[in-house]
Image (cartoon, rainbow, N blue to C red):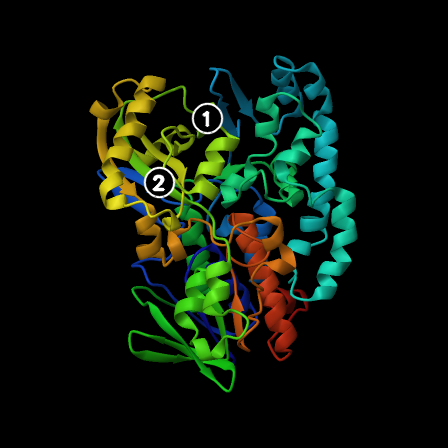
Amino acid sequence: MKKAVVIGSGFGGLAVANRLASRGMQVTVLEKRDKVGGRAYQFTQGGYTFDMGPSLITAPEIIEDVFRAAGRSLSDYTSLIPLDPFYRVYFHDGTSIDYSGDAEAMKEQMRQFNERDADRYDAFMAAASKVYDAVITEKLGARPFDTIKSMVDFVPRAMRLGAWKPMSLFASTFFRDFRHRFLFSFHPLFLGGNPFRSPAVYAMIPFLEKKQGVWFTPGGMYSLVQAFERLLIDQGATIETGTEVSRIDIRNGKAVGVTAGGKHYPADIVVSNSDVGHLYRDLVPAENRSKWSDSKVARTSYTMSCFLLYLGVKGTYPQLKHHTLILTKRYKELLRDIFDKKVLPDDFSMYLHVPTRTDPGMAPEGCESIYVLVPVANLLSGIDWKEEATPFADRILAYLEQWGMSELRDRIEVMKIFTPDDFESQLNSLYGNAFGVEPKLTQTAWFRPHNRSEDVSNLYLVGAGTHPGAGVPGVLLSAEATEYCICADHPDVGASSNALIEAGV
């Protein structure tokens, strides 16, 4: 029985661990924090429950695939709740749109602002569906892009689909009103990307949402983490929390295990779900890195970070949906401040997650569990968050009160602040990035860190920093791509338990 060690237990790590366990491997997952989840962590206090990271599910079929590989069903472990609308977006001029997968409802709202844009909705979705077909239906997102041939084969198709264009430019070819251009191009922000330079391959997301819906799990997204954890335990895998890996152990250019807490964990295969920059800079000795040298790690562009407030609030705010975006007048300029200038601007746009709109049990009766996410520059900015965190939080709360959340500060019972410093210290994210390697054209597909390490044999990558990218669907697809690499390199890895079941074994 081959041994696999998985470093980190985010969605990508848990998914690949389950996939390898379903193939009969002896799997051990090592997690730095006191419980599994990685960025998909959970915080509870005073009767309030907060998801600290991902807040929605957009591709239930991709999740189901992980359970199916083990001969199980997602419904054996948790259930899904559909959201409608997916998001409510408030624009700077006081207008708003409830964004959903209902084509007629979307067109009706869009007609208030631009008749032609409403008429172009179907054309946009038709174009986006072709990108979806390539990435999801034909599984390009679930196969490694680690050869020149794989990239050369895809380039002509990407050109025909317009997938090479910046996402904002792709949307602007269909829509004229600024609201609609935002609605159908903002999705890279959920993955740490700038829509003005992230490629339009991410146009698949609006179509994915329309086709498969947007979902939530009872008790919060952490219920899905726990479902993956229980599936892993049911398959006989081992999970060790409070166990931080300090080194990849390498012999003759091959990974032979890891060291954590002074203990050597032998392995035939090592899979890293840790931040890519941290993996190559801190865990793989420099003498074993010809491709991913320290200078290469430093030259790589990492995503922006986030400033997060977790608020337990007395009373409710009905104007907030489960997912609410509140936008400032500046958009492109604000993103330039965050991504390029790396300064702390005076204004901000924000995303609010209010799961109590769907699951009131995540807060005491009649109260709200809210997290507020504000994109900010990563730690290359030099911003001193020990000094800035409290005044920045006060500015956000004051803005929300002025915007319409009356008496917010007086109604707060629980407040936790999470800054770029915390991304670095708690999640080992290089420069405090929130989503890994930035999803721009020159860091997409073959240009991203590969699922199969380019420097060390038997070392593999999974998660937001590798192909295809961040977001729950992205990291789950990366798990499938990484499994594909492992099976190609190790033909003796057994058939999945699902395949055995189908064969009657």
Q: Report the disc number at residue 327.
A: 1
Question: At 46% from the left edge and 80% from the top edge, which residue is drawn?
Answer: 287
Amino acid type at circle 1 is Leu
Q: How many numbered marks appear? A: 2
Mark 1 vs 2, N-terminal side? 2
Please identify the quadrant where the C terminus is shown: bottom right
Q: Image quadrant of residue 111?
A: top right
| Most foreground residue, 222 or 468 | 468
Q: Position of residue 166 (x, y in %)?
A: 64, 40
Q: Position of residue 350 (x, y in %)?
A: 41, 31
Q: Residues within 10 Å of mark 2 (few under 14, many from 20)?
A: many
Relative to residue 369, is residue 108 depicted above or below? above
* Camera-side residue of 38 and 297: 297
456 lies above or below 128: below
Q: Is residue 144 left or right of residue 90?
A: right
Q: Is residue 359 left or right of residue 204?
A: left
Dot label at residue 47: none
Determine the residue located farthest toward the front in the rendered image: 341
Q: Secondary structure at mark 1?
A: loop
Q: Is residue 391 above or below residue 164?
A: above
Expressed as whole percent of the image width and height from the top left, the position of residue 3 reads 48, 78
Is 499 displayed left or right of 434 in the figure?
right
Regarding residue 217, the answer to whether it shows in the image is no
Amino acid under disc 2? Phe
Measured in 3D between alpha carbons, the distance from the residue under mark 1 to the one under mark 2, in whole angstroms, is 16 Å
Q: Residue at x 52, y 47 (%)?
A: 471
Q: Is residue 146 visible?
A: yes
Element on which disc 2 rests: strand
Q: Residues within 10 Å of mark 1 (few under 14, many from 20)?
A: some
Report the disc number at residue 307. Answer: 2
| Residue at point 44%, 45% (across, down) | 304
Q: Position of residue 179 (x, y in %)?
A: 57, 23
